[in-house]
Amino acid sequence: MTATQSNPRQPISLYTGGALFGLPDASPFCIKAEVQLKMAGVPYVKAQGMPDQGPKGQIPYIEDEGRRLGDSTFIRAHIEKTYGVDLDAGLTPQQRALSWTIERLLENQLYWTVVYSRWLIPENFAKGPAQFFNRVPEAVRETLRQQVLERVTNNVRAAGPGRHSDAEIADLCDRSLSALSLLLGDQPYFMGERATAVDAMALGVLASLLTPYFDTEVRRRVLKYPNLLAYTDRLMAEFYPDFAWEPAVAAAA
Ligand SMILES: N[C@@H](CCC(=O)N[C@@H](CS)C(=O)NCC(=O)O)C(=O)O
């Protein structure tokens, strides 16, 4: 009898924001965590999460064997260690370093452009994050909505984009998109022929920038990079075959 048979692990519970805004998950970090679980082939069930119930005050978080763990990077480390997988198997140390660097660009810069586009452009806020508060009791709904908007505005300012104009944000984003497009080239995945960890966040961020649900200048900028569009459509079909993703290549045509 193997260790797994004598002591079967329960599937991991992955707590996320859920499908929204034309995306399989409203949060790029939740897409990253889910795609990495899929890449690892680890059984999981998806559940609706609330940031304040996660150990880091954010989504995604997981529950595994009764223990809650937050932050997509720590979730990845836990999966790799616990299940004996390496999502970057076969990569050289230089490729692993490049992978980490690309992931930081996606998480520390482009992610904040996503947040800016949804929260700080009033039309997008109204049709997007403002709806998160619909189930809050009416008496406090507007106050809470404004409090959270103020907190996110401060975060986006601290992260950088909140200090810039719409055009400046789009220009900075474009430089990163251009770099990503060059690095991807005509390869199927960022690190070559096989999907590795970095592709999970790349899919999360690119799909979040590309969803037609929000009309943004940065979306128009991404639409200029055919290889990034084809990549996003391809990975969406690979990792979310049942999700009705609106193909980006068609939108650009
Ligand atoms: N470093 C975290 C970032 C996660 C994150 O920023 N989650 C956002 C949703 S996309 C969140 O929960 N925000 C709520 C908050 O910060 O209060 C990770 O890798 O998981």
Image (cartoon, rainbow, N blue to C red):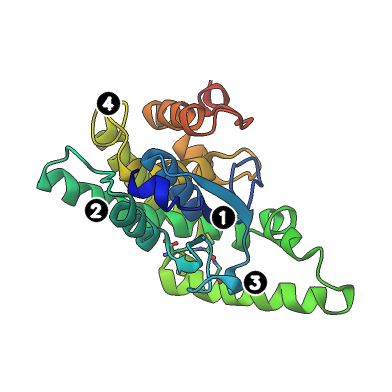
Q: CA distance from mark 2 to mark 1?
A: 23 Å
Tell me which residue sits at (61%, 29%) in the image: 242
Q: Position of residue 117 (x, y in %)?
A: 57, 55
Q: CA distance from mark 3 to mark 1?
A: 13 Å
Q: Nearer the viewer, mark 3 or mark 2?
A: 2
Q: CA distance from mark 4 to mark 1?
A: 29 Å
Where is mark 4, residue-wise? Answer: 187
Label 4: element kind: loop
Q: Earlier in the sequence, mark 3 or mark 4?
A: 3
Q: Position of residue 119 (x, y in %)?
A: 61, 62
Q: CA distance from mark 3 to mark 4?
A: 39 Å
Tell me which residue sits at (58%, 77%) in the image: 151
Q: Earlier in the sequence, mark 3 or mark 1?
A: 1
Q: Earlier in the sequence, mark 4 or mark 2?
A: 2
Residue kind at label 3, given as amino acid type: Leu
Where is mark 3, residue-wise? Answer: 149
Residue kind at label 4, given as amino acid type: Gln
Q: Earlier in the sequence, mark 4 or mark 1?
A: 1
Tell me the number on the disc at residue 101: 2
Residue 206 falls left or right of residue 198: right
Label 1: element kind: helix
Tell me the number on the disc at residue 117: 1
Q: CA distance from mark 4 to mark 2?
A: 18 Å
Label 2: element kind: helix
Label 3: element kind: helix
Residue kind at label 2, given as amino acid type: Thr
